[in-house]
Image (spheres, rainbow, N blue to C red):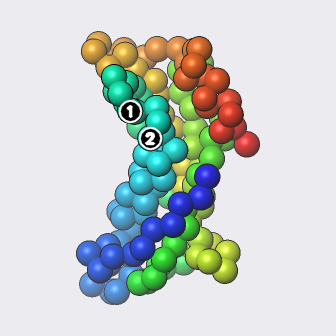
Amino acid sequence: MKISIDVRYRDLDTLGHVNNAVYLTYFEYARLKIFHDWFTGENEPDFVIARAEVEYIKPIFIGTVDVNARVSHIGNTSFTLEYEITNGSGELFARGKTVQVMIDPTRGDKVRIEGEKKRFLERLLN
């Protein structure tokens, strides 16, 4: 899935490029877009981020970037999303990865990925 994000002035640091922490916010925005339907109605988000990685390749300045996100792995209780931040010309600025662990939202315990959630993730697996 690809989403476009306008870089905002508040995303910039004193050097005039996107602050390193904001890259994770861009990944989060893409993740929320992917799972929007999952979170509607009675459903609560039922995973937590266990790990986040960012490989910074080039600085991002004011403009528009694209975040490409995909499910790259589905385990028993966790799944992995991989991200790339590019511009309209395909120039690569960063790569990243997050590992999400499925939990029972009321108890906080890890749970198996099963049923509808597993089928949803399998459709996004590349």
- Residue type, mark 2 in image: His
Q: Is residue 22 above or below residue 89?
A: above
> What quarter of the picture does the C terminus occupy?
top right
Q: Is residue 12 above or below residue 45?
A: below
Residue 18 horizontal/vertical position (percent): 38, 75
Q: Depth check: give the residue in front, 89 or 102.
A: 89
Q: Residue furthest bottom?
A: 15
- Crowding at dot 1, Cα within 10 Å, few <14 / some 14-19 / many 20+, comes out as few
Q: Depth check: give the residue in front, 77 or 86.
A: 86
- Residue 48, image quadrant: top left
Q: Residue at x 51, y 72 (%)?
A: 65
Q: Is residue 49 above or below residue 25?
A: above
Residue 71 horizontal/vertical position (percent): 63, 41
Q: Depth check: give the residue in front, 39 or 49.
A: 39
Q: Depth check: give the residue in front, 43 or 122.
A: 43
Q: Is residue 105 above or below residue 101?
A: above
Numbered circle sitting on residue 36: 2
Residue 106 horizontal/vertical position (percent): 27, 15
Residue 56 shows in the view: no
Q: Looking at the image, do the residues carrying marks 2 and 1 touch, with CB atoms under 8 Å apart? A: yes
| Helix, strand or loop for disc 1 | loop
Residue 99 shows in the view: yes
Mark 1 — residue? 40
- Residue type, mark 1 in image: Thr
- Residue 79, image quadrant: top right
Q: Residue at x 59, y 58 (%)?
A: 2
Q: CA distance from mark 2 to mark 1?
A: 7 Å
